[in-house]
Image (cartoon, helix red, strand yellow):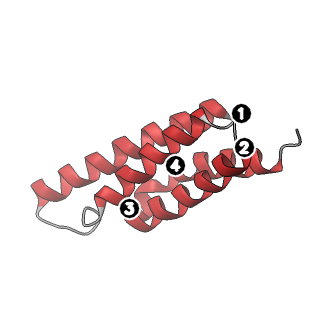
Amino acid sequence: MKNVALIGGIIGLLFSIIAQLLAVTDDSYTFGNIWFLGVFSGIIAIVCSLYIYKNPLLAGWLLILTTATGVYALAGLYLIPGTMTLIAGINTLGRRN
């Protein structure tokens, strides 16, 4: 699940930056208004992927939180990375040590 969370965080970070760049060139600030929240979610997901085995409870809850904030920031554009981080977060919380 570490790799799924890492890839989801990287894709979320890239999608957020691309959404902002397209919003600036298109002059329609629909998905690009709060792009920094999507970038922040991607960065937190990348950091949480490194802590999955050290502190799984915190990493799992933060991955679920980054999914919610990423979907709030970018709506439909964050579905793929959001699904990946949500699956990693739920699996991390459900795993028995």
Residue appearing at x 73%, y 52% in the figure:
90
Query: For numbered disc 1, what is the local secondary structure?
Result: loop
Tag 3–tag 2 contact (CB < 8 Å): no
**Residue bearing mark 1:** 53
Looking at the rendered structure, the kind of residue marked 1 is Tyr
The type of residue carrying mark 4 is: Ile
The Cα atoms of the two marked residues, 3 and 2, are separated by 27 Å
Q: Earlier in the sequence, mark 2 or mark 4?
A: 2
Give the foreground label among 4 and 1.
1
Q: Which mark is residue 74?
A: 3
Question: Mark 2 against mark 4, which lies toward the viewer?
Answer: 2
Task: Calculate the distance from the C-alpha at mark 2 to the C-alpha at mark 4.
Answer: 22 Å
Q: Residue at x 43, y 46 (%)?
A: 42
Quadrant position of residue 13: top left
Marker disc for residue 80:
4
Q: Decide: few, some or many residues near mark 2? Use Cα within 10 Å; few <14, some 14-19, many ≥20.
A: many
Distance from Cα at disc 2 to Cα at disc 1: 6 Å
Q: Given contact means CB atoms under 8 Å apart, are the residues at marks 2 and 1 in contact?
A: yes
Q: Secondary structure at mark 2?
A: helix
Check disc 2 and report the residue beneath it: 56
Distance between the Cα atoms at labels 3 and 1? 29 Å
Q: Is residue 94 left or right of residue 26?
A: right
Contact? badges 4 and 3 (CB < 8 Å): no
Label 4 residue SS: helix
Which residue occupies 51% across, 55% down? 79
